[in-house]
Image (cartoon, grey):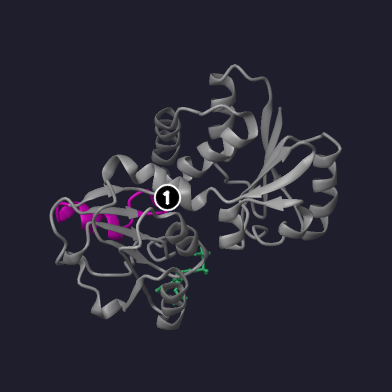
Amino acid sequence: MRLAVIGHPIAHSLSPVLHEQWLRASGLFGRYEAIDVTAAELAPLFQAMRDGEFDGFNVTIPYKEAVIPLLDDLEEAAKAAGAVNTVYKRDGRLIGANTDGIGLVTALDPYTDWTGHVLVIGAGGAARGIIHALPTRNVTVTNRTMSRAERLADEFGIESSTLSDVDVSRYDVIIQTTSVGMDGVSSPLSLNRLRQNTVVCDIIYRPLVTPFLSEAAERGGKTVNGIAMFVGQGALAFERFTGVKPDQLVGMKLIESLLEE
Ligand code: ATR
C-alpha cells in the first residue's frame, strides 16, 4: 500500500504519522509520504496513481479544487464542497471524496445528539463542507462578510446572522471554522453569554487551544479542539484507502502528543 498527502507547503503535515500508525495497527504493509508538488506536477502524479504507483492521496492546500479535473468521479460531498481532500481507486477509476465535513461531524457525535441549535462561524470552504455534513438544518451561519453567510443560508435553507447580532446563549453546539485564532491572540466572537455545557469546537489545531476555545472552557463549555476534525477526516480517508476502520482515539492521542511537544 503506497499512500501520500500532496500539497504545498507540506513539510509540517501530520498526516504521515497518523496514517502510518494506522497502517501498522491494521497489520497492513505500506507507507504514507508527504509530497510537495507544484501545480504542473499534479497531472503526472495522478497518472502515476492510474499506473499503480499509488493507492491513495490526501489532498491539501492549495490543490483541493485543482485536482478535480484529473478524477473520474466525485462523491456527493466532494461535489457539494467543490473540493476534494481524498482520492482513492475503485475498479481502476480515480474517485474524489471530501471527508472534512463529515469527519468533523462524526468526531462531534459523542458530544451531541444534534437535536439542538447549531451555530457555524465562518462561510468559507470549511464551513460549507461542515454545514453540508450536519445532520440538522437547525443551523445559523455567521460571518464577517455577511453576503457570504447569506449565500450559504440560501443554499442550505438555514438562518444567517451578523457577528454582532449573534446571541451565543441560544446555541447547543458552536463550530468555529475561520482562521481567526491561529495567531494565538484573536477570537471571532465574544462568548460572554455562553451557556454551561454548550459544545464549542474550533477546527484550528495550531495552536491546540485558541483564545476562542480557552474562553469557552473558562465559561463552562465542553470544548473540542481541531484534532477532532483532523483525525476524523483522516479516519474516513483511511477507510476508503484500505477498507479498514482505524482507531480514532489512538490517532487523537498520537496527534495530541505531537502538538503538545
Ligand atoms: P476555508 O476554505 O479554509 O474556510 P476561506 O474560504 O478563505 O477558507 O474562508 C475563511 C473564513 O475565515 C471566512 O469565513 C472568512 O471571513 P470572510 O468571508 O469575511 O473573509 C474568515 N476570516 C478570515 N480572516 C478573518 C478575520 N480576520 N476576521 C474575521 N473572519 C475572518
Q: Is mark 1 within 8 Å of ligand 1?
A: no
Q: Secondary structure at mark 1?
A: loop
Quarter of the image for residue 22 reads top right
- Residue at 44% x, 64% y is 179
9 left or right, relative to 71: left
- Residue at 71% x, 27% y is 1
Residue denoted by label 1:
205
Q: Is residue 203 rendered magenta in the image?
A: yes
Query: Disc 1 residue type?
Result: Tyr
Quarter of the image for residue 255 reads top left
213 left or right, relative to 87: left
Give, as a single range, the part of the protein colored magenta. Answer: 202-220
Q: Is residue 41 rendered magenta in the image?
A: no
Pick whichever, 63 or 147, lies toward us.
Answer: 147
- Residue at 51% x, 29% y is 245
State whether residue 223 is above or below residue 188.
above
Pick whichever, 89 or 44, lies toward us.
Answer: 89
Residue that protrudes farthest toward the top in the picture = 27
- Residue at 28% x, 70% y is 189
- Dot 1: few (<14), some (14–19), or many (≥20) neighbours within 10 Å? some
Q: Position of residue 126 (x, y in %)?
A: 49, 61
Q: Position of residue 23 (x, y in %)?
A: 59, 25
Q: Position of residue 231 (x, y in %)?
A: 47, 40
The image quadrant where one finds the C terminus is: top left
Quarter of the image for residue 81 reads bottom right
Q: Position of residue 63 (x, y in %)?
A: 68, 58
